[in-house]
Image: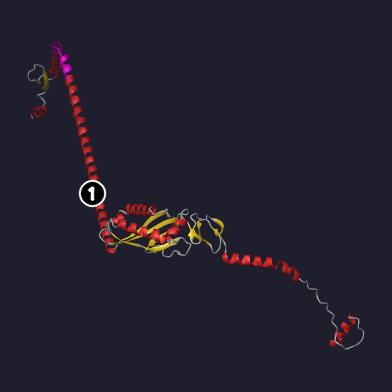
Amino acid sequence: MPADLNDYFNKKNGNSNNDERKPNFNFKKPNVPNFSGGLGKFSGIIYALIAIIVILVVAKPFVVINSGEVGIKSTAGKFDPNPLQPGFHFFIPFIQEVRIVDTKVRQINYTSTEGRNEANFRGSGIETKDTISVLDSRGLPVSMDITVQYRLNPQNAPQTIAAWGFSWENKIIDPVVRNVVRNVTGKYTAEELPERRNDIAAAIDMGIRSDIDKQPNQPVELASVQLREIILPPKVKEQIERVQIAKQEAERTKYEVERANQEALKKAALAKGTAEAVKIEAQGRADAVKIEADAQAYSNSQIARSLTNNLLELKQIETQKGFNEALKTNQDAKIFLTPGGAVPNIWVDTKDKQKQTSTQN
């Protein structure tokens, strides 16, 4: 195999002899351009660019401020009174410094249980603190769960940071909230706190706002103050529950008494109505009888006025005629006369024993 390769290369190179020498490989050396002269011309510019890039990376003389934030620039340790608004800003490294502060609404939860599991990492805007322990007017311990929402005043942020530092929340918000809650709650007994909850919440809100507004340069804008829960001692809580049960029982008794009174008034009204109805009915009957009697009397009076002596004599003649006709039929009849008058009006057949007996009885 090596001999064949040698023959191949020999033939390719024009060597027809059978010399057993090693093949002669004539490879040309590639032409490499010489940059030594050109690189010297641009080396200074390249080094300068590299130095600028290193400075930009290490010193970072610019800052980007997002919405809901402001920048506080300090020159040689002195704060610029005008805050940097959201956007892109340059500054001089090692001489100037820009600190970014959050101006979005933040929240502090003073709580015993609620909010403990919330993320309390930097930038979340939510901070959890222990519930506020206070004493009522009698010295009994009470716990108040409060939520406070606020934001840093962006216009006066440099002055606020210069006066209070970057931990301004713990120096402004926390002391004011705890002090106001203690002062307001201390005016009431533990039993009064649940009943006066709305008044207490309003007083706490007003007190915190007043104290915050009194701070110089108005460092904080208060959004809201919420009284979430009033935690009473167990014995006080049991006593309040007993009082509530007694009040509910009293209300129930009062309702039952009122209901009984209403039933009694209803029955009395029904009885009165029935009596009035009977009275009206009796009065109606009496009036009817009276009207009838008056009518009869009037009729009699009219009849009496219409009677004359001639009419009476005529009536007597007619009656006498009737008796005469009767005597023709029964000769043994007895005629009875009405007292004070001469006109007979009754006769009886004496031959009829049965009639006679019944008449005598």
Q: Secondary structure at mark 1?
A: helix
Is 133 on the left or on the right of 257, as rendered?
Answer: right
- Using the rendered image of the protein, determine whether residue 1 is visible from the camera's viewpoint: no
Q: Is residue 318 above or below residue 8?
A: above
Q: Which residue is mark 1?
A: 257
- Assign the C terminus to one quadrant of the image: top left
Query: What amino acid type is highlighted by mark number 1?
Result: Val
Q: Residue 333 at x, y = what percent?
A: 10, 21
Q: Residue furthest top?
A: 310
Q: Residue at x 68, y 67 (%)?
A: 44
Mark 1 packing: few (<14 Cα in 10 Å), some, or many (20+)? few
| In-image side of 29 versus 255 (left or right) | right
* Segment colored magenta: 300-314
Left or right of 33? Residue 169 is: left
In reply to whether residue 303 is colored magenta, the answer given is yes
Residue 110 image offset from top left, x and y in percent: 38, 61
Residue closest to the eye, 42 or 336: 42
The image shows residue 6 at horizontal and vertical percentages of: 86, 85
Residue 234 visible in this rendered orientation of the protein: yes
Majority secondary structure in the magenta region: helix
Above or below, 276 relative to 165: above
Q: Is residue 4 magenta?
A: no
Q: Nearer the viewer, residue 139 or 344?
A: 139
